[in-house]
Image (cartoon, helix red, strand yellow):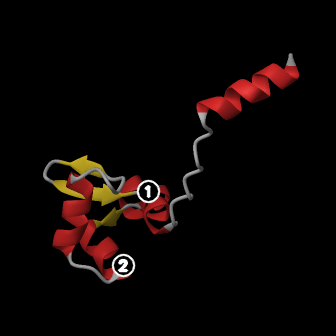
Amino acid sequence: MTAESETLTAAEVANKLKVSVETVYRMCKAGKWPATKVGRLYRFTPEQYQRIIEPPAAPQKPRTQRRNIDRLLRSA
């Protein structure tokens, strides 16, 4: 099996996600979806497609500076 047969085209990704091809191109150009650009076309490896369909991890709340200082003082 060649690398070309393992990659997905923008049309295939659009079909799987039930969105338009224009949406796929727009998301790739905006840098929101990982893709490999071949000339003017986008190709997607199975790993890149998996990253598109996986929900993003919820961001953790940053600790306040005071909490960090308190933690450092307790450990000392």
Task: Name the element at disc 2.
Answer: helix
Image: 34 above or below 76: below
Neighbor class of circle 1 (other Cα within 10 Å; few <14, some 14-19, many 20+) is some
> So how many labels did they put on this image?
2
Task: Name the element at disc 1.
Answer: helix
- x and y percent of residue 29 in the render? 20, 53
Task: Determine the residue positioned at 31% across, 81% down.
Answer: 15
- x and y percent of residue 69 in the render? 70, 24
Tell me if 50 is positioned left or right of 25 in this view: right
Image: 45 above or below 18: above
Residue at the outermost top position: 76
- x and y percent of residue 6 in the render? 43, 62
Task: Tell me how far mark 2 sits from mark 1, CA to CA.
Answer: 14 Å
Task: Determine the residue positioned at 46% across, 69% down.
Answer: 53
Quadrant containing the C terminus in the rendered view = top right
Residue at the outermost left position: 40
Q: Which mark is residue 33?
A: none
Amino acid type at image mark 2: Leu
The foreground one among 40 and 69 is: 69
Task: Determine the residue positioned at 69% across, 34% down.
Answer: 67
- x and y percent of residue 48 in the render? 43, 56
For label 2, the residue is 17
Tell me if 31 is positioned left or right of 49 in this view: left
Image: 17 above or below 31: below
Amino acid type at image mark 1: Gln
Q: Which mark is residue 48?
A: 1
Neighbor class of circle 2 (other Cα within 10 Å; few <14, some 14-19, many 20+) is few
The foreground one among 56 and 36 is: 56
Residue 75 lies in what quarter of the image?
top right
